[in-house]
Image (spheres, rainbow, N blue to C red):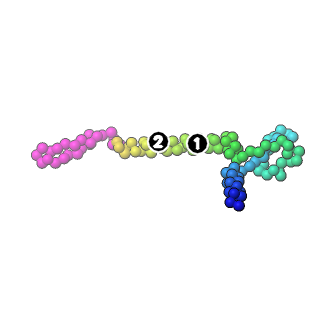
Amino acid sequence: MRVIYLVVGIMVMASLDAGATFYKYRDSSGAIVITDKLENVPQKYRKQYKVILDEQLDARDSLKKRWAAGKEAQERQEQEQRQRKAAKKLMPSDGKRLVITVDEQTGELIRTME
């Protein structure tokens, strides 16, 4: 009995991992048609349809590829801006440098920007 539950559990997990299923066929005018329901494929095209998984469509989707590339470029740009801001905080904005001298009479530290 446990074996049956194990087999059924594995089958359920495998079907969840597969993602959405689509059906693709070419109609009489030569257009490619993709649908998510087999009953939407006309009977005369049932012998020629192909099953396509969601991941396969995503891999071929040029809009998704461009969106991902744009997002990656934006993240790189934001990272560069953060690095530039961090570098600016380390440098004085007017190009001057801090000079520390010691007053010989009082021993006091004198800080000046030059």
Residue at the right extreme of this rendering: 44
Question: Would you name the residue on which mark 1 appears?
Answer: 70
- What secondary structure is found at the residue carrying circle 1? helix
| Residue 61 is at least partly visible in this image | no
The amino acid pointed to by label 2 is: Glu
The amino acid type of the residue labelled 1 equals: Gly
Q: Is residue 110 magenta?
A: yes
Residue lying at the far bottom in this picture: please name it.
1
Which residue does the image show at 83% across and 52% down from the upper left? Answer: 39
N-terminal label among 1 and 2: 1
Q: From the top left corner, tell me how far across and down residue 27 is, in percent.
A: 84, 42
Closer to the camera in the image, 78 or 44: 44
Using the image as rendered, state which of residue 67 and residue 15 is in the foreground.
15
In the figure, residue 71 lies in which quadrant?
A: top right
Question: Could you tell me which secondary element the residue under label 2 belongs to?
Answer: helix
Q: Is residue 76 left or right of residue 94?
A: right
80 relative to 38 in the view: left or right: left
Quarter of the image for residue 26 reads top right
Q: Which residues are magenta?
A: 92-114
Q: Residue at x 71, y 61 (%)?
A: 1
Specify whether 54 is left or right of 75.
right
The residue that disc 2 covers is: 80
Look at the image and say whether residue 8 sits in the magenta stretch. Answer: no
What residue is drawn where x is 77% and y is 50%? 36
User: Do residues under tags 1 and 2 come within 8 Å of each other at their CB atoms?
Assistant: no
Q: Residue at x 14, y 47 (%)?
A: 107
Locate residue 94: give its quadrant: top left
The residues tagged by marks 1 and 2 sit, at their Cα atoms, a distance apart of 15 Å
Q: 60 or 63, which is in the foreground?
A: 60
